[in-house]
Image (tube, rainbow, N blue to C red):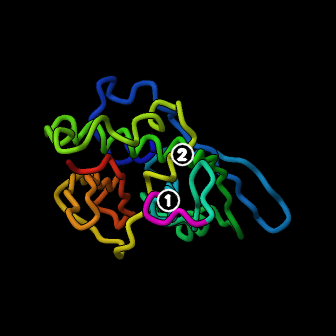
Amino acid sequence: MWAVRVYRDLKSRTKHKDSPKTYPLTVFRGERQEEIKLSAKEYPILLSFPIFSPPAFLNPEGYTSGIRLKGVATVCFGPRPEDVATKLCATKIQLTQDYEYVTFARMLAKIAYAFAAAESQLRFIEGSATVLPAILGKADDIGKWVGTLTQPLQSYGGSLHRILVHKDKEKGLLIGEVQLFSDSQTPSYGVILGKLR
C-alpha cells in the first residue's frame, strides 16, 4: 500500500523519504517485452483487496484453518492501466504483486482489536478477545474470526479509513468493522472480537 500512500501524499513520519522513487512495470510492444520504471504519479497502482468467506465461527462448514478466499476486488489509484498503455505505445502492460492473505487478515483483526481497546469496547466481551491468539500467530484460525462483509462496496467520503465496533445482540457478539481506503469503494471486513457478556 506504500505506492498509494506516496501517490496520495499521505502523512508519514519520514515524509516518504525511504519510499521507492519508481515502480517496475512490464511493457509489451508486439512481441517485444521490456521492464520500465515509473514514478507513483505515472504508475497504474492496482490495489487488490481479498474477498473472504464470512467468518467460519458463523459458518464453520468445511473450514479447517487459515482463511477462505472467495475472490479479489481490485481498485485503481492513479492513472488507469489503459491510459498508461496508450501513453507508452504498449499492446499490453503487466505488474506483479505478492499477497499474503493470512497476514492481511491478521492485520485487519489487529486494527479492529486496537480500535475496540481504544474505544473501551472490549469490556463488553466475556474474557479475552477470541481473535487474540490468531492476531499473535499462536493459532492458525484467523478465518474463524475474520471475513468480508456481504454488503455492496460503498465509498465513504471524508475519511481515509472507516473503523467501527458493533454489538450484535442477535448473535451475542462484539464485531469490529474495518474498511481501508473507504473513499474508494473498497471491501469492508468484519472481525469477531468476542462473545458479549
Image-quadrant location for residue 118: top left
Q: How many numbered discs, if any?
A: 2
Numbered disc 1: secondary structure = loop
Mark 1 sits on what residue? 56
- Residue at 53 percent of width and 41 percent of height: 103
Q: Amino acid at mark 2?
A: Asp
Say which label, 1 or 2, has the lower sequence index. 1
Residue 164, percent from left and from top: 21, 53
| Label 2 Cα neighbours within 10 Å, binned few <14 / some 14-19 / many ≥20 | many
Please tell me which residue lies in front, 178 or 136: 136
Measured Cα–Cα span from mark 1 to mark 2:
9 Å
95, above or below 58, in the image? above
Residue at (17%, 38%) from the top-left corner? 123
Q: Quadrant of the N terminus?
A: top left
> Which SS does the magenta portion mostly show?
loop
**Residue 196 in the image, given as x and y percentages of width and height:** 23, 50
Q: Nearer the viewer, residue 5 or 168?
A: 168
Q: Nearer the viewer, residue 39 or 45?
A: 45
Q: Is residue 90 left or right of residue 45?
A: right
In the current view of this chain or complex, which residue is farthest to the right? 31
Q: Is residue 21 above or below residue 67?
A: above
Image marks 1 and 2: residues in contact by CB distance under 8 Å? yes
Residue 48 percent across, percent down from the top left: 52, 58
Q: Is residue 10 left or right of residue 23?
A: left
Q: Mark 1 packing: few (<14 Cα in 10 Å), some, or many (20+)?
A: many
Residues in magenta, as a range: 56-61
> Compared to 131, does 57 lie above or below?
below
Q: Position of residue 67 (x, y in %)?
A: 56, 53
Q: Residue at x 29, y 59 (%)?
A: 182
The type of residue carrying mark 1 is Ala
Query: Which residue occupies the extreme left position in the image?
Result: 120
The local secondary structure at tag 2 comes to: loop
